[in-house]
Image (cartoon, coloured by chain):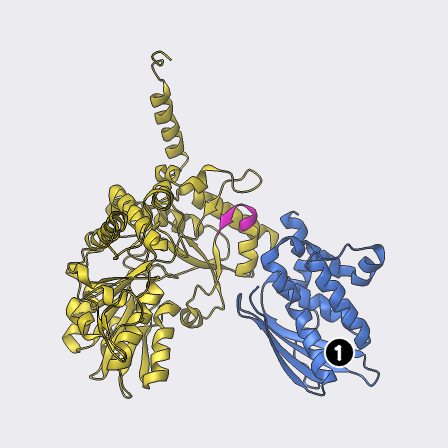
Amino acid sequence: MSLRSLYGNIILDHYKNPRNMGELPEADVVVEARNPLCGDELTLYLKLDDNQRLAEVKFTGVGCAISQASASMMTVAVQGLPKEEAEELIQLFKQMVMGEAELDAEAEARLGDLVSLEGVSQLHNRVKCATLAWNALQEGLEEFARGGSRAELVEKAD
Amino acid sequence: MGMSMPMPKGSSELEQAAEQEAAGECSWRRDFPIFNQPYRDGIPLTYLDSAATTQKPQVVIDALSDFYSHTYATVHRGAYELSSQVTDRFDQVRAKLAQFLGAPDERAIVFTRNATEAINLVAYAWGLDNLSPGDNVVLTIMEHHSNIIPWQLMAHYRGIELRYVEIDQQGELKLDQLAELIDEHTRLVGVTHVSNVLGTVNPLPEIGRLVRECSDALILFDGAQAAPHLPVNLTELEFDFYVLSAHKMLGPTGIGALISRSELLEKMQPFNGGGSMIERVELDTATWAELPYKFEAGTPHIAGVIGWGAALDYLTQVGMERVLDHELALTDYALARLSQVPGIRIFGQGQKMRLGVISFELAGIHPHDIATILDHHGVCIRAGHHCAQLLMKFLGVPATSRASFYLYNGRDDVDRLVNALMEAVEIFR
């Protein structure tokens, strides 16, 4: 994998112009996630509607291009999705960046721009950067199911 | 076989050396087998993480292998010839280390796992008995976590206060602040000899005198980042504890040392209890072995000590003055070249003396992205907080990139670093 394909236009665009960045005061769940190994920090805000759809997803935080772009693209991808579909997308995305899935045409269509992060699967020490936001989303949905509104996620070393 | 042909080899070797010299390669690099092979996809290894740990010369690798192959046995149980020989070699390394550091008191050289364990030894074996609520320990903002956390643990156990000396714009310790922080309740002052982030060489003679003049506080110097890179002469220093690690100076991991004074160590309780450190054991009590064995419980890392001895021999043969000169020249070159990279900010410039540890940030590019791009070019640097989160906070950055040099690095390494950084700038443009 070449550097230019990892740091391609889509990733750099989301890194430099992150979508849905900012706080969401009316959020149902707020997840504070961090990766102590590299210092990445991310706060994820989730608002669900009455039909358990992700009505609004926003984030704040600091981190590398991979973690920031991944978070930005995720907020776009899951906006409006029913909870179950969001959970399926989380699994699919994680399988992709961990190199555990051969992507067929259907999977690629579901992932859309997120496919640009596939190269991370060849960089073992960057996988956690890509999954931080997604693990935070998973944690947030579980916290919502438990009836809570605040969750914390600290990534562990391998 | 008859006589061999007169060899043109000598001259071609000389030519090769001259070529390498011209390319900015370093002649000592050939002593390190890891550099005699391509790193990845045919590109050379550009190893710029010696502040974390150093590569090993063939002589150290051979010393370990020979020791395990031919003369391995335990130490200090001299019931048979082999063990006596190993014990002699083991204690000869202690003498070598004394010589290397100008440490006058061999009995006060204790082998530990590393510098971290040596500081923990001081914190527990001295601190638990000698610190009480109301006392304080003065540290600096540029300490490695290994010289902070043991004292935070003492704050937990003994209710002491921790005080921190800050740094100025140039990356030097504020010595006037050090003088202000020390009072009659200060029991220990802990200062790193060389910063593992900024490369700053702290003025230990001045700090030692200053502490002695205004207090009875003990002095601990962390030499982990210094002893590998510059000549150390402890006889010229006011100090009570000096610690270092072998793996940062071409030796094996898992071995380090505490250098102290016998009369001080005599008064301290042991750190670890176990075999080798006792004289006589009763049901409820025991008496301690003589120094330094009182602090060396359990079977030590014998091979580690033997390997460290080989590393000390190698460094002595090269000469620490030459090691330092090489590093200072390379650091000057690196600072000049790095300053040409657009958007770079180098932390700690303008110190009176600084070694080849260069921390920097590039505007708009996270250290981990820099590290990934550099790794693609075979350039290994550290990205993160460098076990110095207090300093990161003080500098106002979550993380930095850090390139650090040793005697096997040359100008060609710096050139490859700069070229790779230029590509990072280009990608993120």
Give the class, few, some or many, for how many residues have Cα within 10 Å of label 1's Cα (few <14, many ≥20).
many
Residue A85 image point, x, y percent? 81, 72
Q: Nearer the viewer, residue B281 or B60?
A: B281
In reply to whether residue B344 is colored magenta, the answer given is no
Residue ID at (54%, 55%): B370
Compared across the picture, whether B418 is left or right of B299 comes to right
Residue B410, quarter of the rendered image: top left
Residue ID at (31%, 56%): B354
* Span of residues in magenta: B375-380
Residue A21 image point, x, y percent? 67, 73
Residue B294 image point, x, y percent? 24, 67
Compared across the picture, whether B321 is left or right of B405 comes to left
Residue ID at (81%, 74%): A84
Query: Is residue B174 visible in the rendered structure shown here?
Result: no
Residue ID at (34%, 76%): B151
Q: Nearer the viewer, residue B274 or B19?
A: B274
State which chain is coloured yellow: B
Query: Is residue B297 visible in the rendered structure shown here?
Result: yes
The numbered mark 1 sits on a residue in which chain? A
State which chain is coloured blue: A
Q: Nearer the viewer, residue B79 or A127?
A: B79
Quarter occupied by the N terminus of chain B: top left
* Whether residue B178 is situated above or below residue A97 in the rendered picture: below
Compared across the picture, whether B263 is left or right of B117 comes to left
Name the residue carrying label 1: A56
* Whether residue A74 is situated above or below residue B371 in the rendered picture: below
In reply to whether residue B379 is colored magenta, the answer given is yes
Quarter occupied by the C terminus of chain B: bottom right
* Amino acid carrying mark 1 in the image: Glu
Residue B219 image point, x, y percent? 22, 71
Q: Secondary structure at mark 1?
A: strand
